[in-house]
Image (cartoon, rainbow, N blue to C red):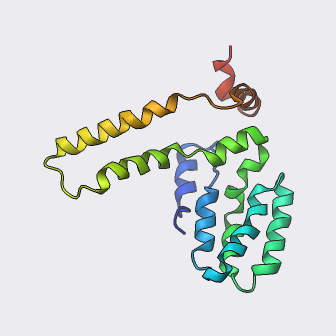
Amino acid sequence: MRGQHDGFSEAITASYPKTEIQKCIIHQIRNSTRYVSYKDLKKVTADLKPIYKASTEEAALLELDRFEEVWGTKYPLIIRSWRNNWTELATFFKYPPEIRRLIYTTNMIESYHRQLRKVTKGKSIFPSDEALLKMLYLATMDVTRKWTGRVQNWGQMLLQFSFFFPDQVGHHLR
């Protein structure tokens, strides 16, 4: 599936064995609805929402069961995909809402790439490699200027991070 690359998790955990992988919910939804008929699209999308918006993993699994009861016969690949990827789709359920929101709403890398594509899309040919690099540099400077904003409830999140990751975060708080 696009966005859910085979081998990605294995490659990451080979280098970083303690990594907790959270696959992108948005990519999972896009992949799930890729082959859904247009007349079912709004309903399928609405019926997927309670799965990833659930307050606990147990509640999310119940919602997935409900989704399967309604759509499993017509769209078995959606069910198979969610179940096969569940471990890495449900990672964020172990964290409190403040951290969850940070995990599934922030994708700075994709946003950055989108901005770079935006400035290069209209130009099929650059006069030189240096011209391309200058364009990308200027776009990067523009994008990074927006990265200085404050994260809402950062103090609460930092406290939660120090609880979940004491070895990684704790020494920064001393």
Q: Is residue 70 above or below residue 171?
A: below
Is residue 34 in sight in this rendering?
yes
147 to 2, vertically: above or below: above
Residue 167 position by quadrant: top right
Residue at x-position 72% and y-position 74%? 43
Q: Is residue 134 left or right of residue 49?
A: left
Looking at the picture, tell me which residue is in the foreground, 59 or 19.
Answer: 59
In the foreground, 144 or 42: 42
Q: Quadrant of the C terminus?
A: top right
Toward the top, the furthest residue is: 174
Q: Is residue 147 left or right of residue 100?
A: left
The location of residue 45, given as percent across then percent down, is 69, 69
- Write the residue at 14% across / 46% down: 128
The quadrant of the rendering that contains the N terminus is bottom right
Residue 103: where, in percent of width, then height?
A: 65, 44
In the displayed structure, 56 sits above or below 35; it is above
Figure label count: 0
Question: How far across and how far down the image is residue 145, in percent?
Answer: 44, 30
Rendered image quadrant of residue 84: bottom right
Is residue 27 rendered to the left or right of residue 170? left
Tell which of 12 and 141 is nearer to you.
Answer: 141
- Is residue 20 something one can see in this rendering? no
Which residue sits furthest bottom? 73
Residue drawn at (64%, 58%) of the image? 25
